[in-house]
Image (tube, helix red, strand yellow):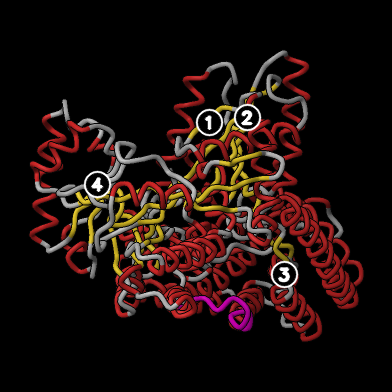
Amino acid sequence: MVPLRYVTGKAPRDRRQHPNAGFWLIQGGALALAVGCCVLTASWDHWNRGPLIAIAVLAIASDLTAVWVTTKVLVSGTLLGLMLAAVLLGPEPAAMVGALTIAVSWFRWREAIGAFAANLVAYVWFPLVSGIFFYASTHLLHTGPNGAMYYFLVLATFVVGLCVNQIGVNGFAAYLDRCSFIQKVREGIGPVLAAELFSAVLITVAVYFVAKTGTVGIAILAVVLVIFQYLVGELLKSQRRGEELRRRATTDELTGLANREHFSSVVEEKIAAAQEAGTTFAVMLLDLDRFKEINDTLGHHYGDVLLRDLGPRLEKCVGGNGLVARLGGDEFAVLPELQADDLDALQLEAEKLLECVREPIAVDELTLGIGASIGVSRFPLDGEDVHDMLRRADVAMYSAKENHSSFKLYETALDRYSLRRFTVLNDFRRALENEQFVLHYQPVVAINGQEVRGAEALVRWEHPELGMVPPNDFIPIAEQSGLIGPLTHYVLERAVAECKRWRNDGRPLSVSVNLSVRDLLDLDLPGNVASILTAHNLDPAALHLEITESMIMSDPDRALDTVTRLRELGVCISVDDFGTGYSSLSNLKRLPINELKIDRSFISSLPHDESDLIIVGSTINLGHDLRLNVVAEGVEDEITLKRLEKLGCDLAQGYYFGRPLPSQEFVVLVDRLGVKQPSTASVQFAG
């Protein structure tokens, strides 16, 4: 054991007291008083050079090679050396060894000047007092190394020295940290009391050994202690390496959460306990929304900071009785302390987790916001082992993500959906290569005159085994898997080629492609669009590219840059689904757009909803004030068309004019309705 010394205060920096003139006066007075005591007790000292040097080397070497066992306990022979000096050499030599130990060991501990002064005073006074107490006691009781009372007094001397040491160091710590002296003594003595008692016994035995062997015994003790400290240090290093390996085996390095292996083992234990007790529990799988966009747009540093911040927040949200793990990427697993049959509690827990994820995260000068989707599986209803539980929670999570419902309980019917999803994803690239995607067209008509101005084309997948796959079954998968870019290029190629054929046949229509968020963040997009237009020799004004309000808001500056470069090509830009997003007029007026498309949710209720009538009228006026064309989507009856005509809307599309048709059938419809030089058209992925 090493005697107590002050290294670092534990109080917050703003509460910590800094040494002042009064402190330095007290420290100086204490050292002066110690010198006076040394002078007065000089006749009690035994200045034996050999033992003095051996004890000094023992104390200093032990302090320099001390090994931390815990944050409170050190293994060191320093206390043994100082007690030997006090007992065998007297007060002044003991005080000198203490001062020398503090002076040399500063090169290891590097205390602040105030802490160094307090430690110096403590290391001078407690050996000095110990030496005085021991000399006075042995002379008063007339005992020596051959008497049992002599060694009992060694124990008493140790206690006296320890008390003086505690008073000195804890007094300074209490002053510096502005807290109770009693509190500091409890903090200092409590964790090391057992070790101090062991040290008292060890010191007594060592004094007996040295009394019988002299300087040689001190040297032997020094060698034994140094070897012992070295072995303890190596043992602790090995133990810490083992603990670190175990920690790495069970912990995610980035977030500090449990990893997949640890989570699986805990769930397996939970399954065994639940089977024995007849209880239930749930596993939640949480996947972040738009995380890849952050990595692609801002870089992986921002994604890593976001994940590191999110991990502790999720743990706090779940509480100490639950478990949160990072399974990889942006996917987390949660084991809440809830019964699986309490569906209300499960939903409440999921909502808490979602709110936790949605809290903005500051990274450098940016504030990032994300969402999440959660899938839940329940034991034993949805599986009887950890693999089934995680797989089915994953199935439910993807269902929640693709249905934009945020939270979904696993159902047996979802497995068929999951198999279909896997098949779709697996066959997607092959479908692009084999041209299994086809475009169907729906006319966009001028309200005044009802002449065709363009076409909205909807992409379909003619799967050889699954049949006609609707857009909602593969567009979300393409967006999540990063395959939306190749699909956009595919649709652009075919839409532009079809538009060129219409024009060559005397039908001056135009066409547009609805871009995804990932497309808008693609720096190569303007160049690719230019290449396609050049390859088919199509007038750029015949191509309209559609973006949504949410895409604009995801990264306004990046969107402005991309849209501006596209407009410089001569391409027209439409804002699709207008009214359903979160755009502001400040962002809208910055974008070089040509057209607003009012979402069908406002148009379908136009004949009987006065509020929607006001909204649509205001939107049309806004578009015209900004010198934009306005298109109404989802027109299905003549009443709606008449109201739009009265409101001054420019263009309309919907089942009233015709359903989406293959190109050849669409041309027949166009010829029947009539054609006029277009002002807009569109190709979109959903229908």
**Camera sees residue 31:** no
Magenta-drawn segment: 104-112
SS at mark 4 in the image: strand
Residue 200 is tagged as none
From mark 2 to mark 1, how far is it between C-alphas? 10 Å
Mark 4 or 1: the one toward you: 4
Image location (x, y in percent) of residue 542? 33, 68
- Establish if 196 lies above or below 50: above
Marked residue nearer the N-terminal end (4 or 1)? 1
Instruction: Give yes or no for residue 213 being in the magenta stretch.
Output: no
Three-letter amino acid code at disc 2? Leu
Marked residue nearer the N-terminal end (3 or 2)? 3
388 and 8: which is toward the camera:
388
Three-letter amino acid code at disc 1? Lys
SS at mark 1 in the image: strand
Task: Check if mark 2's residue and mark 1's residue have beta carbons within 8 Å.
Answer: yes
From mark 3 to mark 2, how far is it between C-alphas? 62 Å
- Residue shown at 64%/59% (left/top)? 253
Marked residue nearer the N-terminal end (3 or 1)? 3
Marked residue nearer the N-terminal end (3 or 4)? 3
Provide the residue designation for mark 1.
408
Three-letter amino acid code at disc 3? Ala
Image location (x, y in percent) of residue 221? 86, 70
Provide the residue designation for mark 2.
414
From mark 4 to mark 1, how far is it between C-alphas? 37 Å
SS at mark 2 in the image: helix
Three-letter amino acid code at disc 4? Ala
- Residue shown at 36%/67% (left/top)? 543
Image location (x, y in percent) of residue 314? 50, 44
Provide the residue designation for mark 3.
66
Mark 2 or 4: the one toward you: 4
Q: Quadrant of residue 46?
A: bottom right
